[in-house]
Image (spheres, rainbow, N blue to C red):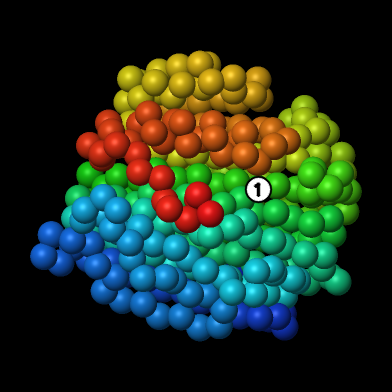
Amino acid sequence: MNPASAKLATNPASAMGWQARLELGFANINARTRLKHSHHIGPLRVQRAFYPEGNLAHMYILHPPGGVVGGDQLHITLDIAHQAQVLCTTPGSGKFYLSAGEWALLEQMLCVKPGASLEWFPHENILFAGARLRVRTRIELEDDAVFMGWDITCLGRPGSHERFEHGAFDSRLEFYHNQKLLLVENQRVLDIQTLGAAAGLRGQPMQATLLAFPCHKSHLEQARNSLGKNGASPLTGATLIDGLLVVRVLGNNSETLKQQLIIIWQTLRPELLGRPAILPRIWAT
């Protein structure tokens, strides 16, 4: 982690739940990305690296309890050193259950050094009705580092006809390049009106943001063409901000939404990393 980085906000609620911390450091050793540093506290783990495409490491982050309740705190830090290449995902969706009043906290700090790359593709976070979740994500890139990743949230359980009619969601995402802030997004869902508002979620329980850097206008056009050819939801948009490609999607079906994002990744990955897109094996299980 960059020592000059601003510290992520912590949960103002009392730490009464399960505390978990995972810190991973990756390095390029003998032309292959290795997990050089791993430190964990509580129920966060990582499997050994897989290498389905040569020197690039595929890593799976595990949360053995399978669910989070109010008061639980999850802190994840990834540091990708010079020339290291990592794809990180999870075996399944994160589940955040009904809270008796406490907030759950998910903090994610992702640092990518020059010449390195990180592909960050966790499955969606599902908030059950009555959950209270605060998410803080900070992404820091240096020089020619490459990043592709997404953030997917489902409010309620549409498959079970459960709406997120009570509960709270407070999210902040920051993206930096060479300590310059390129994007900051805040979202707060504190009442049912936000779910249906035109400036809110427009009645859609699922939302996703895909980020890719560094990108140019040609990448933006490719992303838009990819969405247009594959039956994307009309509640989809893509924009380019100082070299950062931002794709936003609203929907009501997790598989359809993720497939839209995967298609964009498959389109852009050869351009950004010089590699065809190899899906993690765990996605097929």
**Nearer the observer, 201 or 281:** 281
Q: Which residue is mark 1?
A: 153
Query: In the image, residue 94 lies at what x, y percent?
Result: 63, 60
Query: In the image, residue 244 lies at what x, y percent?
Result: 39, 35
**Vertical placement of 171 versus 79: above or below?**
above
Picture residue at 79% right of the left edge, 61% below the top: 131
Task: Give the tally of numbered discs.
Answer: 1
**Nearer the observer, 230 or 197:** 230
**Vertical placement of 202 versus 107: above or below?**
above
Picture residue at 61% right of the left edge, 35% below the top: 257
Quadrant position of the N terminus in the picture? bottom left
Query: In the image, residue 262 lies at what x, y percent?
Result: 48, 36
> Hey, which quadrant is residue 107 in on the image?
bottom right
Is residue 134 visible in the rendered structure shown here?
Answer: yes
Query: In the image, residue 96 lies at what x, y percent?
Result: 72, 62
Is residue 163 visible in the rendered structure shown here?
Answer: no
**Vertical placement of 36 versus 263: above or below?**
below
Three-letter amino acid code at the position of disc 1: Thr
Q: Residue furthest front?
A: 285
Picture residue at 40% right of the left edge, 18% below the top: 221
Picture residue at 79% right of the left edge, 57% below the top: 128
- Residue neighbourhood size for the residue with mark 1, other residues' Cα within 10 Å, grouped as few (<14), some (14–19), many (≥20): many
* Left/right of residue 149 with respect to residue 172 in the rendered view: left
Q: Residue furthest left?
A: 30
**Vertical placement of 132 versus 194: above or below?**
below
* Mark 1 residue element: strand
